[in-house]
Image: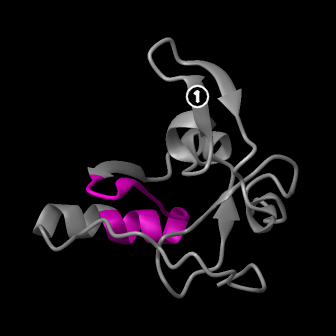
């Protein structure tokens, strides 16, 4: 799942979906502590709500039914993931039609936590 939903992880052979390459994952992503399992092993994504600093592993987020959205864009794929509180907000925005998936600022956000 990480090769599909973590922007810097990719398949060396995309057609066969083989050979996962994590060499482009920035160190800041490896330092994020998953607020679900408490581990900073592997790499995590950050909640896409701009003022939220919570991060989580894709696998932990999927296990907890968090919203993780994927959209093909002109400059590449955009992945938006939301913590539990912002997943609820995201689901409400989808119902009203007032939602848009946009790339999150790529700068480090500092301390993890809302």
Task: Specify few, some or many for label 1: CA neighbours under 10 Å numbering under 14, 14-19, or 20 or more.
Answer: some
- Residue 25: percent from left, percent from top: 71, 53
Question: Quick check: can you spot residue 34?
Answer: yes
Write the start and end of the magenta stretch as one range: 73-90
Up the image or down, 19 lies above or below 108; here it is above
Q: Which residue matches tag 1?
A: 11
Seen in the image, is 79 located left or right of residue 30?
Answer: left
Seen in the image, is 9 located left or right of residue 102?
Answer: right
Seen in the image, is 17 located left or right of residue 90?
Answer: right
- Residue 103: percent from left, percent from top: 41, 69
Residue at far left of view:
97
- Residue 57: percent from left, percent from top: 69, 50
| Viewport quadrant of the N terminus | top right
Residue 79 lies within the magenta run: yes
| Viewport quadrant of the C terminus | bottom right
Residue at point 58% right, 36% down?
10
Quarter of the image where one finds residue 56: bottom right
Residue at point 55% right, 41% down?
62
């Amino acid at each position: 799942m990480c090769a599909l939903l973590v922007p810097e992880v990719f398949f060396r052979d995309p057609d066969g979906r083989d050979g996962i390459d994590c060499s482009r994952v920035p160190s800041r992503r490896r330092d994020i502590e998953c607020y679900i399992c408490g581990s900073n092993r592997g790499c995590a994504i950050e909640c896409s709500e701009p003022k939220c600093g919570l991060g989580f592993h894709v696998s932990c987020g999927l296990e907890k039914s968090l919203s993780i959205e994927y959209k093909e864009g002109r400059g590449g794929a955009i992945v938006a993931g939301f913590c539990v509180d912002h997943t609820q907000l995201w689901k409400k925005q989808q119902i009203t039609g007032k939602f848009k998936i946009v790339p999150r600022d790529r700068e480090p956000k500092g301390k993890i936590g809302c």
